[in-house]
Image (cartoon, rainbow, N blue to C red):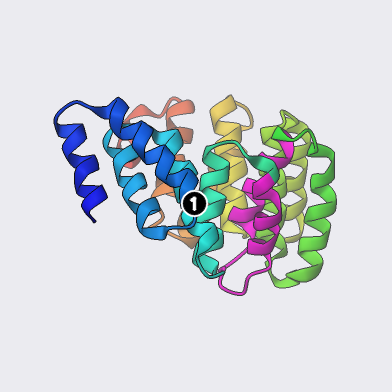
Amino acid sequence: EAFSSWLTLTVITDRMGQATEALEARLRDTPDDMGLLAAAQNFYRGIGDQAKVYEVAERLLLLSEPSFERTTYLIEIYMRTEQYGKAMPLLMEARDSKMLEGPGPVLYRVSQAMVALGRADECDAVVADTIERFPALKLEIQLAQASHYSRVGNRDKAEGIKIAILKDNPGHAPTNNDLGYTWADRGVNLDEAHRMIDIAVKEEPGNMAYLDSMGWVLYKQGKFGEAIVWL
């Protein structure tokens, strides 16, 4: 506590170099002191050194008991600091966690990490394995797969997956909105895009993303007076 107060005082009196040197020496001597790490995190946050904030936060988390929350925070740190190799095993752990409502958001980050690691071609295998583990969430998982292909620039593959979903599930609101918005944004298939977005809006009339999509497709159709009501 005394050291923490001294750190604060050095910042106030503009002796940050001295404080940083003393802090790093203490961290080398007692790397597992959670109180010191917490003080260090506050210090680095105070001087605006975000890289050090993440570094110390990682050390604190690794010293804490394993939990879903710890895994979640570590993933966030690794993704923000582009440490994708460290993120991958934790992402797969999170994917299989029963505390998640669904694997879709995690798969989006898996895709981001795999692309960054040059392993984009492995995503289909991850998707197939995830569908096998969570068959009831197949549509959500397939949409995450489509997002992956959009990420790597394969627009045709992404749209093909969405079209295949709608062939078997024509009333699926998220896919109708996703593909409808994509086409509206490109200015293609506007009548069909309008029809699909209308399905999504009727299914979930309070969904702001769907309402925004409706305004956008109407705008792209040149129906400016109608569009303004939705946007």
Which corner quadrant of the image does residue 157 belong to?
Answer: top right
Residue pointed to by mark 1: 31
Q: Nearer the viewer, residue 71 or 200?
A: 71
176 up-or-down from 231: above or below:
below
> What is the count of numbered marks?
1
**Disc 1, SS:** loop
Q: Residue at x 68, y 35 (%)?
A: 150
Which is more toward the observer, 195 or 110? 110
Point out residue 71 in the picture as x, y percentages from the top left corner: 56, 61
Q: Give the amino acid at mark 1.
A: Pro
For the question of whether residue 74 can be seen, the reply is yes
Residue placed most toward the observer, 180 or 84: 84
| Left or right relative to 81: residue 167 | right
The secondary structure that most of the magenta stretch takes on is: helix
User: Image height check: is 145 above or below 65?
Assistant: above
Q: Position of residue 156 (x, y in %)?
A: 77, 33
Check if residue 112 falls in the magenta segment: yes
Highlighted magenta segment, given as a residue range = 86-115
What is the quadrant of residue 105 in the picture? bottom right
On the picture, is 44 further left or further right than 182?
Answer: left
Question: Callout 1: few (<14), some (14-19), or many (20+) C-alpha neighbours within 10 Å?
Answer: some
Determine whether, in the image, residue 117 is placed left or right of residue 64: right
Q: Position of residue 18 (x, y in %)?
A: 29, 29
Q: Image height check: is 146 above or below 169?
A: above
Q: Residue at x 66, y 41 (%)?
A: 84
Percent x, y for residue 30?
Answer: 46, 52
Name the residue: 45% across, 50% down.
Answer: 57
Quadrant into which the N terminus falls: bottom left
Outermost residue toward the bottom? 98
Question: Residue at point 61% right, 33% down?
Answer: 183
**Magenta run includes residue 164:** no
Which quadrant of the structure image shows residue 98?
bottom right
